[in-house]
Image (spheres, grey):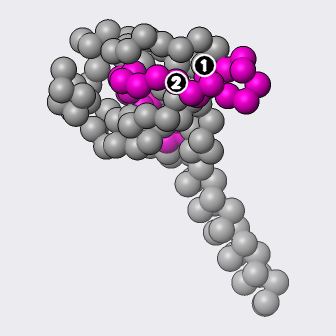
């Protein structure tokens, strides 16, 4: 009897985990939008630069975003910076102001 009860509980846990992993609204990566408004810092190896800027997601929520580049951007450049939950930054993409979400435009005063 205890074995059947244990198997039932274990089965329910497995089903719960599988259903939770299959959700479509789980966000593994989120885009942040930044405007280059300061100079990049050169890293110790002198081959890369790092930016540490305020970024905004599509809802206008603020987060400090850091990312590395091979060459610094010009001031005023707008970027889409993908970030994962683990902090990994994907490839940055230069964008135009019309591509920004409305909330981000307001935060960046564009």
Q: CA distance from mark 1 to mark 2?
A: 9 Å
Q: Is residue 41 magenta?
A: yes
Badge 1: how crowded within 10 Å, few (<14), some, or many (20+)? some
Kindly identify which numbered label has been placed on residue 69.
1
- Residue 33: say if magenta: yes
Q: Which residue matches tag 2?
A: 40
Against 14, is 33 above or below?
above
Residue 62 vertical placement versus 43 (above, below): below
Left or right, residue 49 beside residue 40: right
Question: What residue appears at the point 40 percent right and 43 percent down from the top-left corner?
Answer: 63
Which corner quadrant holds the C terminus? top left
Image position of 93 with respect to 53: above or below: above
Q: Quadrant of the N terminus?
A: bottom right
Q: Secondary structure at mark 2?
A: loop
Marked residue nearer the N-terminal end (1 or 2): 2
Magenta range is: 27-50
Q: Which of the two discs, 1 and 2, sits closer to the camera?
A: 2
Q: Residue at x 55, y 54 (%)?
A: 20
Within 10 angstroms of label 2, few (less than 14), some, or many (20 or more) residues?
A: many
Residue drawn at 52 percent across, 29 percent down: 51
């Amino acid at each position: 009897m205890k074995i059947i009860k244990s198997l039932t509980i274990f089965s329910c846990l497995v089903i719960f985990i599988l259903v939770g992993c299959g959700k479509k609204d789980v966000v593994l990566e989120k885009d942040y939008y930044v405007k280059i408004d300061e100079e990049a810092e050169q890293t110790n190896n002198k081959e890369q630069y790092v930016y540490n800027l305020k970024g905004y997601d599509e809802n206008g929520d603020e987060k400090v975003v850091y990312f590395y580049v091979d060459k610094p951007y010009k001031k005023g450049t707008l970027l889409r910076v993908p970030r994962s939950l683990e902090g990994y930054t994907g490839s940055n993409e230069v964008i135009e102001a019309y591509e920004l979400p409305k909330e981000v435009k307001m935060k960046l005063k564009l």
